[in-house]
Amino acid sequence: MDNAFRHQLESKEMKHREDMAQLEEERQMELERANQRVRIQINQLNATVKCIMQISQSEGKNSNQPIKCYCEMHHANQSIRG
């Protein structure tokens, strides 16, 4: 193999490695964003379950409790969305 061809081949291989590293980094970032969305959804579901439990426990005791719980959840959802 002559030097010019070897250099050309090595350059292409290096570019390919750089491209693969960039794609891996982008994939990792997208995975992190997806995991963050899942964590947000889990937190929202947990808040909903907590609210439902509070409502069921407070039925007949305090009529303001469901409204308070709903307002807290609504505020939390708005702050998450920006």
Image (cartoon, rainbow, N blue to C red):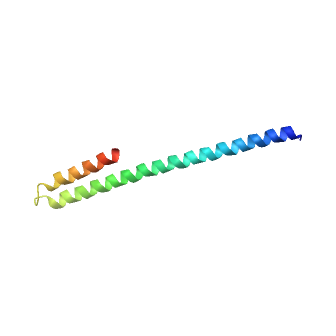
User: Which residue is at a point 37% across and 50% down the rendered structure image?
Assistant: 41
Q: Position of residue 78 (x, y in %)?
A: 29, 45
Identify which residue is drawn at 78% across, 43% down. Answer: 10
Residue at (29% x, 55% y) in the render? 47
Going by the image, does 43 lie left or right of 75?
Answer: right
Q: Nearer the viewer, residue 73 or 4?
A: 4
Left or right of 26, for residue 15 = right
Q: Position of residue 39 (x, y in %)?
A: 40, 53
Residue 29 in the image: state x and y as whole percent: 52, 48
Q: Is residue 23 left or right of residue 38?
A: right
Displayed quadrant of residue 14: top right
Image quadrant holding the N terminus, namely top right
What is the number of callouts on the image? 0
Q: Quadrant of the C terminus?
A: top left
- x%, y% of residue 51? 24, 56
